[in-house]
Image (spheres, rainbow, N blue to C red):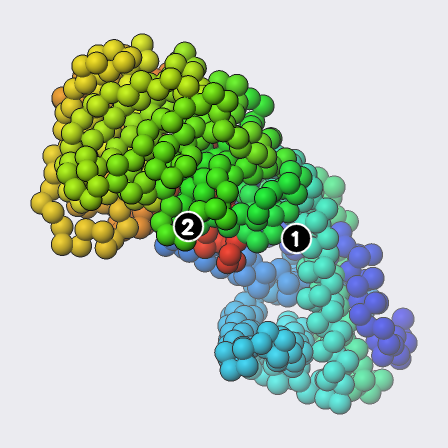
Amino acid sequence: MTRIELVERMRGSGVLWRGSLDGVRRLVPLAVPGALVHAPLSGFVLLLMVVWAGGSAAVVDGRLDLIGASGGELLAWTVTLAALVVLAQAVVFPATVVLAAGWLVGRRVPPVVALRMAARRFPAMFLLVVLASVAYAAITAAGFGVLVVTGREWPATVVMVVLGLVAMPGLLAVPSVMLHGCTAPGAVVRAYRLVRYRELPTACTLALGVVVVPVAVARAAEHALAPLPGPLSTAGWAVAGTVLALAVTPVQAAVVARQFLHCVAWRTETHDEDLEHGVPAGTARPVRAALWPVVLAPGLLFGGIVLVNPFRWTEVTETVVSGGEDSEALGSGAGTLSRPPSFRPWELRSAHAGHDGELKVVVDGLYTAAGVLTCGDPSCERAGLAWADDVAALSDRARNGYAAARLPDGRMAVTTWSGPRLRVSHCGTFACAAAPGGAVVAEARDRPFHAGVAMAVRRDGGLVVAFADRERADDGDDLVTLISCADAACSRPEPTEAARLAPAAYLHGPPVLAVAAGPGDRPVAARFDVVTGQIHVISCADAGCRRPRVTRPVPPYPARDDAGLRQETGLTLAVRADGRPVIAYRDVRDRAAKLLDCRTPDCARADVVTLDAGDTDLATPALVLDRAGRILVAFQNAEGTRIMLATCTGGRCTSTPVARIRGGAGEALAMTLDDRGRPVIVWLDYDAAPEPGWELVITTPLNLTD
């Protein structure tokens, strides 16, 4: 090809189409610089991830997530990874531009020669990267400023698009540095001189070829892999991500090289050699097929590590159920709801797992009746909500407290109020009804919304209810009554006055009264004083609790002046097979998450284990016993950024992060065991969803209790 023919060819229109076609047709030889640099870099990053971040890693829904890393560690990891990628691209992209320019002018430049050129020009390219970063920051700041001034997104978007187009010709500085040996500032000046009188077409061509089309291809790949389940998605991205990373740079470089030579051709006489200037001569060898398995090896190795999990990272599944004013967010069963749910962060009460992935979540708050949200499958695609009371019939003042327990047949027993009288209702997936033959379980002497209620299911299918109420209206001590019911309807309640305690507040927030059925269906109850922090344990020698015993394993602190002003806390209770209770709570003095491990069935002697430091506005820990009798405690870490799961045996606890809190986990956690004996942690992420919406997050660690 003569120089005249070359000049005429480079002057031809359709730079975007021709450049993209050049990149696709010569994809294999143009991808060699990326393969030679990114393959060892990917291996190094994989090794760095295993060594440095392995302790913070977890496999969430088949995808790797550093949920154990602090904010600073995560920022350091992100910055390090981004810096390595940018520095690598500062070598790969210029070398690929040289190769693409060589193909256009008829010279087959060896990839190693192009990489050496890029290494020699690296200082100038690094300065170009700095200038590009400054330009990007200025464009972002301008858009944010317009958004602040106008309060609208579209003017900010327009400003950022216009400024982005103005900056696009700066990409031609790359071939100016590589081929013409310009300094970074001189290359930028030369780039804008080359596009004089053709600024808009050049900017649009570069924007489409370098930004828009590659981003569109990446989004298409993302949408194509999105329907795959977690493990297959990870394996797919391990291969597709590597191929995409190697394929995008050649197309971008081909567009930039053709646009550069197109501009030079229109500003060059036919006898000039500027089109070939700086393009090294040489003969490129054919690309060996053995190179590509080596290039794909790091991605395949990463996918294999995530799938096989040889390092025993924590494996977690996470389901998010969103809702708010739109009841359709609850899934296929939501169309039968009597009113749209609008749960608040403090309204989560308890969780109860059934068979085949079914989960029932009880919610109850200051301005709503108790409700039972049922997820019919692990993904919660089949969901429904049943309200225990008619919300419209309730007054606008503070609501009464509720308690719930799962019956052996899968229904929920929920306490309801009829004036001062406490009864039991049974709730299915979409509706609640009064228990057939049910009687009045208890009657409040004081105002009902000052009474404390807790309920548990006995091993024989009956119920045990703990009821705390003032001895006299607005006066006197609290009387704690344990009520035994032989059937699930509580048709013949048998009350026993179990304890007379100093009055305490029963708030519509964390549970301060709890009850469980121990061996032989002997009731065990615990009460937490939110003012002084003391805990009373009420134990019984028989199922009827004819000889109750009251102990105080946690003594009171001096009364605080700020009592009631800060977010208060509560407790959760479980009883071992040998009758010894365990209690999880937050200390009112330092807000630390603690475990009270009773040595005796009456908890007269107990050990206190501190799980983590605390702060205000943190949820009360949730507690269950697994099938092996180990204690599992779910709690928020001191910073309120992660959900932790502590596994305790022999007075020692090991805590593991199992979820990252995106917004705020509210003021309550709930936990249960699924039909395979794995812990299921439920929490409301209320800041992550727009008001008045909510996100119910269901986190299931898969391998922590193996």
Q: How far apart are marks 2 and 1 (CA)?
A: 61 Å
Task: Give how far across and how far down residue 581 sits, in percent.
Answer: 25, 22
Q: Is residue 606 above or below residue 166?
A: above
Foreground label between 2 and 1: 2
Find the residue positioned furthest to the bottom: 197
The residue located at (15%, 36%) in the rendering is 477
Task: Give how far across and how far down residue 508 sits, in percent.
Answer: 34, 44
Of residue 557 and residue 49, the one placed in the foreground of this image is 557
The residue located at (58%, 76%) in the rendering is 152
Q: In this view, does 402 lie to the left or right of 496?
A: right
Q: Is residue 72 above or below residue 519?
A: below
**Residue 42 shows in the view:** no
Task: Name the residue beneath numbered marker 1.
Answer: 245
**Residue 543 shows in the view:** yes
The residue located at (64%, 38%) in the rendering is 333
Query: Could you say which disc has been placed on residue 395 in the image?
Result: 2
